[in-house]
Amino acid sequence: MNPVVVAWLQTRAAQALVAGVEPREHLRAMSHLRRLVSAEQAAAAFELAWVRAHATRKFSDGHTLYFTKTALEQASHQRVSAHRTHMYAGATHIADICCGCGGDLLELATVAPVIAVDSDSGRIAMAQANIAVRGLADHVAWFCGDAQEWAIPDDVDAVFFDPGRRASNGRIYDHDAYLPPLSIANAWRRPGRRIAIKCAPGIDYSQLPFSQPYAIECVSLDGDLRETVVWLDADLPWQHRATVLDNAGTHLIDDVSTPAQIACTGLSTYFYEPDVSVIRAGLVQHLAARIGATMIDPHIAYLTHPDAVFTPFARCWQVCAVLPFSERQLREVLRAHGAGPVTVKKRGSPIDTDALAKRLSQPHGVPMVVVLTRVAGAHTAILCTGPIHPKESPNGDEATE
């Protein structure tokens, strides 16, 4: 959308039109809108109505904000942004580079004055509209232009950089092809300036174009990995951290201490599936040491423990049977346990889990989980029930903000 259309969307007349749109009835809604306004305005009004119907999944006030569909898909969840912004406490002047429609800017502007930078004038206009909705207009200055041609003022002591990771032909996986490339951040490094770079969750750490010091944080929300953040020059005590956001709060585990070598054992009574943030941060052994678990294979990110131990960093399943993988034997054991619907998980196995789950499932019976993995190098099937939800002990092991 261009700035003229964004300005029109903020008028009372346009807001009334948007409020009357039913996003699930595209043809009917567009036909009605085109009788009242131009084709461009009709398309913009319908898109905003669709966005607002979905934006409350990410923003508490999403029904009042301004995004395009693509921008909303790319925007950080409000809880993820709030957690990241917590790391900017004490900053005096922030630069939000590639601010887009302002999803992260809404949080950053509550900490310190911000300069918002983007090359897309339409997205800048939407970001300005969102900042106005939150009543933060006095906290933000604007620059519409190429970030590679903009010099960060010397008094900026914190930077948030969210480069574009999508092109017309789909996702961009090579950080050198990011828009702009990650390496541009090297030119912004100064003593005392903290820089956070939002990267694709699956980025290859070995290919990062940065010299030390930097740290990597992997953030999950309700079990889904939402982002990987590279913190440059942040003077942090850890190099890798996993952050788990859930209904209970914010939980942190890092590599400040190095655990002793974790033993590999056979399956015990309970099976633990570490949160994806823990796996991506390389902290599976740290988690094992924290809860007293062992590994089932030196190369597989699964843990086991004789007890059901509470941890926000893993899901816990009760082990019912362990056997060498054979579909025929697996079917017999499931039948003996009265299994009904079957979910199949895997790690280190070539099996098509969806197809196998369909073949194993029955319409009635006990829901069960089959985990296909390697135990001591052997292809193994683990039958589980759960997940189990152990109660948190008074001296719980999680760190919270």
Image (cartoon, helix red, strand yellow):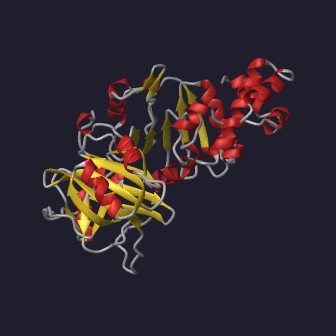
Q: Quadrant of the N terminus?
A: top right
Q: Quadrant of residue 316?
A: bottom left
* Residue 110 located left or right of residue 90: right
Residue 88 seen in render: no
* Residue 169 located left or right of residue 56: left
Residue 317 seen in render: yes
Residue at 49%, 39% in the rendered image: 95
Q: Quadrant of residue 53?
A: top right
Front residue of 301/278: it is 301
x then y, percent, for residue 107: 56, 49
Q: Quadrant of the C terminus?
A: bottom left
* Residue 339 located left or right of residue 54: left
x then y, percent, for residue 280: 30, 48
* Residue 19 located left or right of residue 165: right
Can you say whether 244 is above or below 390 in the image?
Answer: above
x then y, percent, for residue 254: 29, 59
Residue at 29%, 66% in the rendered image: 319
Can you say whether 176 is above or below 346 in the image?
Answer: above
